[in-house]
Amino acid sequence: MTFVHSPRVSSVVRTASVLFLVLTSFAISAPAHAFPEVHTVTFFENVNASDPVSALETANAPQPLTLIQNLDPSFSDPGYTFVGWNTSINDSGTSYADGSTYSFNADVGLYAQWLPIAVVHDVTFFENANATDSTTAMQAAGTPQNLTLIQNLNPGFSNAGYAFAGWNTSANGSGKSYADGSTYSFNADVGLYAQWLPTPVVHNVTFFENANATDSVSSTMKETVATPFTLFVNIQPAFVNGSHKFSGWNTSRDGTGTSYSDGSQFSFQSDLVLFAQWTLTLVDTYSFSANGGSGTISSISGPPGSNFVVPGQTGLIRAGFVLTDWNTSANGSGTKYLVGENVTIAGSALLFAQWSGHGLATLFGAIGTFKNGSSSLSAALKSQINRVALTIRSRKYLKVDLFGYTATTGLNSLNLSLSRNRAINVGTYLRNRLRALKVQGVSISSSGQGSIAGQSSNAYSRVEVFGV
C-alpha cells in the first residue's frame, strides 16, 4: 500500500528520525541494559483504501493506547461510528478496544474499524377523530421495534363514542394497516392514522322469577346490538316456583305480551323486561323433616293417585328418642302418617318426624368399637365399661341410658337387633361392675338405635353412655 504523507506527517517522521539518532548515539556510550527498546504503534484512519491519515504512539513499556479522540491528527469518517482497532484493514486480525493496554514489545499497525451510523426515521401518529383533527404524537427509531401503544401516546388520543380499532397509513383506512403495538421496521418515515369504530350500544335484559304477583327476584343480562347472544342460560339466582314447571318467558307478568322461548338467540334494540312463565306440574312430592333429630330422608315424588310406603327412622338420629310416626304439623296436631303405611299420593306435603323419649343431660362415654356383626364384649370393651362404672360412682349418676349403634349391614332388622344386643350386653356387665364397687340406686336402661344411614365404618359400632 502506498501512502502520501502530509507535511504534518513528514514532520512527525523527521522528528522520530532525529530522536532515533540521538537514542542510538546514547546507546553506543551507555550500557546495553540501561534503556528498554522503544516500539511504535501506528494508527491508520482507514476511511478507504487510499486514506493516508495516520498517527503514532511510542513507548518502551505496556500502557493504554491513545484514545481516538486524542489522536493528532484527528480521525473521523462521516456517516460512520468508530468501533475499535484491528491489525488488519478488514477486521480479520487481532482486535483492540479504544484505550486498551498494549505491551509495546513490538511495532504494530492498527487500523480504525467503522460501522455505518443508524438512520433514524419517524412515525407520526394522527388522532384522526375528524377531518380537521390536528392532534399528533411522534415515535423515532433507527431499528425495528414495537409501535407505542395508543394508551401511552403523549398527548393522549380519544374519540368520544368510538373505540380504537388500529392504525392505517391512510386516514380513511384504505392503506396498510398496523395493529396497536405491532412491530415497525423504522426504515422510512410514515404517518399512521387512528381508525375508530362506533362503541356498541349496550342494552339490558331483566328477568323476573314471577313466582307470585309481588315477586321481586330478578337477574340482569347485557348484550350488544351488533352481537346476538343466547338468553336465559345459567340465570343466577336460580328461578324456582314450588310445584310449577318453567315454560318460557313473556314481556307481561300474566303471559299476555310477547313470548320468548328459552335458550334461543335474540338481538334486542332496546332494554327488555321478561317474566318467567310457569305451569302446574303433574308430580307431587312428599318431603321429610327430622324435626329435632339429625340426618335426612330423601323426598318421595310421584304422580297423583300413585302410592308410596311411609319410611321409618333409618337415616335419622335423635339420642334418647324413637320415631313413632310422621305428621303434617311439627307439633303432631295435623294429619298422622304411620311408619310402613301405604299412602296414596294426593298433593305435595312436608311431613315432620314425631318422637317418643326424653332428652339426656350428659353424654359421658362410648363403648366401642365392636367387631363387625358381633355384640360380644372383648377384654378391651370390658376395660372401657370398668372406667364407665368408676365415672358413675365418682359423679354420682342415678340414671344411665345406653344407646347401641352399628355400621350399616344392609338389613334394617339386623341393624336394630345388633345395636340392641350390644346395649343390653354392656348394661348387664355394667350392673355387675357397679355391684362390685358397692354402688347402689343406679337405674340403667338399654336400647338399640339401629345404624346411621350410609355409614359402613366400624367407628359406628358402639354403645353411647348418657347419665343424669
Image (spheres, rainbow, N blue to C red):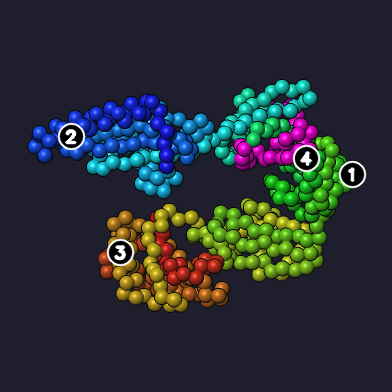
Residue in the foreground of this view, choosing between 428 and 415: 415
Considering the whole magenta stretch, tell me its main secondary structure.
loop
Label 2: which residue?
A: 24
Which kind of residue does numbered mark 2 sit on? Thr
Q: Which marked residue is nearer to the observer: mark 4 or mark 3?
A: 4
Q: Is residue 342 above or below residue 295?
A: below
- Residue 83 found in image quarter: top left
In the image, 270: left or right of 400?
A: right
Which amino acid type corresponds to the residue marked 4 in the rendered image? Thr
Alpha carbon separation for disc pair 2 and 4: 97 Å
How far is mark 2 from mark 1, CA to CA? 117 Å
Q: Which contiguous range is marked in magenta? A: 158-187
Tell me the crowding category of disc 4: few under 14, some 14 to 19, or many 20 or more residues within 10 angstroms, Cα based: some
Residue that label 1 marks = 258
Element type at marker 3? helix
Q: Which mark, by number, is residue 224?
A: 4
- What is the crowding at mark 2: few (fewer than 14 residues within 10 Å), some, or many (at least 20)? few
Q: Are marks 2 and 4 in contact (CB under 8 Å)?
A: no
- For the residue marked with disc 1, what is the amino acid? Thr
Residue position for label 3? 387
Query: What residue type is disc 3 on?
Result: Arg
Depth check, mark 3 against mark 2: the one in front is: 2
The magenta stretch spans residue 170? yes
